[in-house]
């Protein structure tokens, strides 16, 4: 992932967004 930090960050953000959409009552640290 050292060569693709942006792709990793985008994938992580996408996963967190999906998680929040499925669990609106859960608050995650920014």
Image (cartoon, helix red, strand yellow):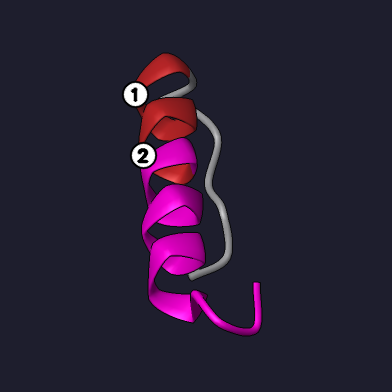
> Element type at marker 2?
helix
Q: Is residue 17 above or below residue 21?
A: below
Give coordinates of residue 11: x percent, y percent: 44, 49
In this view, the residue farthest toward the front is 3
Is residue 1 rendered to the left or right of residue 14? right
Q: Main secondary structure of the magenta part?
A: helix
In this view, the residue farthest toward the bottom is 2
In this view, the residue farthest toward the top is 22
Give the residue displayed 56% in from the left and 53% down from the top.
28
Q: Where does the magenta region start and end?
A: 1-15
Give the residue displayed 42% in from the left and 33% down from the top.
20
Mark 1 to mark 2: distance in Å? 6 Å
The residue closer to the viewer here, 28 or 11, is 11
| Magenta residue check for 6 | yes
Q: Which residue is mark 2?
A: 17
Q: Is residue 18 above or below residue 4?
A: above
The residue closer to the viewer here, 1 or 10, is 1
Badge 2 density bin: few <14, some 14–19, many ≥20, Cα 10 Å: few
Give the residue displayed 48% in from the left and 70% down from the top.
30
Q: Is residue 20 above or below residue 2?
A: above
Mark number displayed over residue 21: 1
The residue closer to the viewer here, 27 or 3, is 3
Question: Quick one: quadrant of the N terminus?
Answer: bottom right
Circles 1 and 2: CB atoms closer than 8 Å: yes
Mark number displayed over residue 1: none
Give coordinates of residue 26: x percent, y percent: 55, 35
């Amino acid at each position: 992932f050292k060569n693709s930090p942006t792709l990793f960050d985008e994938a992580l953000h996408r996963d967190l967004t999906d998680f929040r959409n499925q669990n609106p009552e859960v608050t995650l640290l920014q």
